[in-house]
Image (spheres, helix red, strand yellow):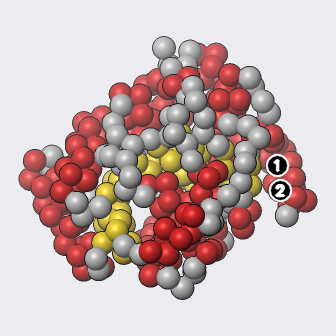
């Protein structure tokens, strides 16, 4: 495991090709909906399908990807940006060699960069985009001006919500904010903790209907994950539920979501009219 991780780190420094990674910002209108848990388990299922995935924990002050993976990171994204700790050190590896960059306090520096700071971030990110197929940004809950700029710069966004009315309302608000900033952004919706797949679909249809009526935005139904006690047990065990109980309802649901997502993409992402980095620079550089 350690040897394999070191080989991946080494390739990051030496392998150069045009940037190809798809950036997906995973967000929610409120906390406590299972956003980070979905991000981790979705990433592991993508890896099972042969994709190279990196999670970038951007939950300001509340990053907990490492807790769900049961590992203790040596560094965080703050070390990368403030102390310029090298890329091969900043990337951590969890179960099934899942790569991730841990969050930390002081992440606002990522959203308030000058030209010099952005140039350093750009060089770092281009190395990552060369190595991975997908980069998942685990964003903080709720909408802040800075995080909305980051999410709207991604190639795609996933909004995680639950069937609860307050969660749906907050999800709607997030979609409204994002559409105002980038109406071309593809927005997927994941309904978590549903009573059944059908109830999840019905929740999505209600949300989609409201969004179409008042915002005029088309949403993409990513899928639904049932309320499953195996998820709670896995969190206690500090192990992703797709590994802790791979035959559970929640694990099967994430597997189905992953297969459908990759099939729908063909996995050939359309040519980008503007890169993630160029959009982000226009919005965040002071």
Q: Pointer 2 and pointer 1: residues touching (CB < 8 Å)?
A: yes
Kindly identify which residue carries mark 1: 9
Please indicate whether residue 203 sits to the left or right of residue 239 in the image: left
Q: CA distance from mark 2 to mark 1?
A: 6 Å
Residue located farthest toward the right when viewing the structure as drawn: 3
Q: Which percent across, then down, holds residue 124? A: 69, 35
Residue located farthest toward the left when viewing the structure as drawn: 213
Residue drawn at x 49%, y 75% as measured from the top left? 230
Please indicate whether residue 155 sits to the left or right of residue 181 in the image: right
Q: Residue 5: which numbered mark, if any?
A: 2
Instruction: Say if residue 23 shows up in the picture.
Output: no
Relative to residue 104, is residue 197 depicted above or below? Answer: below
Residue drawn at x 22%, y 60% as measured from the top left? 164
Quadrant that contains the N terminus: bottom right
* 263, 89: nearer the viewer: 89
Q: Which percent across, then down, holds residue 274? A: 46, 39
Q: Residue 247: which numbered mark, if any?
A: none
Secondary structure beneath disc 1? helix
Residue drawn at x 90%, y 59% as measured from the top left? 3
Relative to residue 46, is residue 57 depicted above or below? Answer: above
Q: Dot 1: within a 10 Å radius of its alpha carbon, few (fewer than 14), some, or many (20 or more) residues?
A: some
Q: Which percent across, then down, holds residue 217? A: 21, 51
Please indicate whether residue 74 sits to the left or right of residue 257 in the image: right
């Amino acid at each position: 495991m350690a040897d394999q991780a070191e080989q991946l780190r080494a390739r990051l420094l030496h392998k150069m090709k045009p940037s190809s990674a798809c950036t997906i910002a995973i967000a929610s209108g409120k906390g406590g909906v299972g956003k980070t848990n979905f991000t981790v388990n979705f990433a592991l299922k993508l890896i099972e399908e042969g994709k190279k995935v990196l999670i970038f924990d951007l939950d300001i002050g509340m990053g907990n990807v490492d807790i769900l993976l049961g590992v203790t990171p040596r560094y965080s994204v703050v070390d990368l940006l403030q102390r310029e700790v090298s890329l091969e050190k900043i990337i951590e590896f969890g179960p099934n060699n899942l790569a991730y960059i841990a969050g930390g306090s002081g992440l606002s520096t990522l959203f308030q960069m000058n030209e010099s700071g952005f140039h350093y971030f750009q060089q770092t990110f281009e190395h990552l985009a060369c190595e991975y197929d997908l980069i998942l940004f685990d964003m903080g809950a709720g909408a802040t001006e800075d995080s909305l700029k980051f999410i709207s710069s991604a190639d795609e966004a996933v909004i995680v919500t639950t069937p609860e009315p307050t969660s749906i309302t907050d999800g709607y608000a997030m979609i409204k904010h994002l559409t105002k900033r980038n109406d071309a952004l593809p927005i997927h919706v994941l309904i978590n903790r549903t009573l059944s797949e059908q109830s999840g679909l019905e929740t999505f249809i209600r949300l989609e209907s409201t969004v179409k009526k008042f915002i005029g935005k088309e949403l993409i139904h990513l899928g639904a994950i049932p309320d499953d006690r195996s998820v709670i047990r896995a969190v206690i065990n500090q192990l992703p539920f797709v590994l802790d109980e791979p035959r559970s309802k929640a694990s099967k649901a994430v597997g189905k979501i992953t297969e459908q997502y990759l099939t729908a993409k063909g996995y050939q992402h359309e040519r980008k009219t503007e890169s993630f980095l160029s959009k982000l620079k226009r919005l965040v550089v002071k």
